[in-house]
Amino acid sequence: MAPTWDDIVDPVVLFADSGNMLGHMWWVGDPSLALEMVEGFFDVAHAYDGLARPLRLVQDGDGFTFELVSSEPREAEMRARVYSYYRRFARNQAQEPPDVSDVREFLYAVADDHVDE
């Protein structure tokens, strides 16, 4: 059976792909709230759920929804994007993402780790 909206695990992490927001990351605890942040397809280059499974933004009536691209996690890819965000935007260049092995706990730790841009 194909993955559904109900299979998406919180939190959701989004990476921007347009204009001056290129490379920025947003962490959202509730996947449905993440949709409220999205204004168009070009706003989100990459998205992952709490298990590091890739998400795709799709048109849903007048709005958008996320669907799982794959049930296979892409943890290394997602972590690389988080590390890239820290390298590019953290004002304190010594700041690195939290050292947490569990992917879901890692994403919650990233949310708690304030990055001054």
Image (cartoon, rainbow, N blue to C red):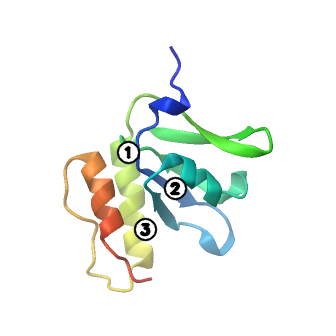
Cα separation, mark 3 vs mark 2, equals 11 Å
Q: Amino acid at mark 2?
A: Leu
The disc labelled 3 sits on which kind of residue? Tyr
Using residue 112 as the reference point, say whether residue 10 is left or right of it: right
Mark 3 or mark 2, earlier in chain: 2
Residue at the disc numbered 3 = 85
Q: Secondary structure at mark 1?
A: loop
Query: In the structure shown, which secondary structural element does the residue marked by tag 3 occupy?
Result: helix
- Quarter holding residue 114: bottom left
| Residue labelled with disc 1 | 50
Query: Which residue type carries mark 1?
Result: Gly
- Observer-side mark, 3 or 1, equals 1
**Label 3 crowd bin: few (<14), some (14–19), many (20+), radius 10 Å:** some
Quarter of the image holding residue 59? Answer: top right
Image coordinates of residue 4 in percent, x first then y, are 54, 27
Residue on which the image places disc 2:
14
In this picture, residue 48 sits left or right of residue 18: left
Q: CA distance from mark 3 to mark 1?
A: 18 Å
* Callout 2: SS: strand
Q: Earlier in the sequence, mark 2 or mark 1?
A: 2
Asked whether, in this view, residue 62 is left or right of residue 99, the answer is right
User: Residue 100: percent from the left, percent from the top?
Assistant: 19, 56
Q: Residue at x 38, y 43 (%)?
A: 52
From this view, report whether residue 83 is shown above or below residue 53: below
Q: Closer to the observer: label 3 or label 2?
A: 2
The residue under the point 41% across, 65% down is: 84
**Residue at figure coordinates x 44%, y 44% from the top left:** 49
Residue 44 lies, in percent from the top left, at 61, 55
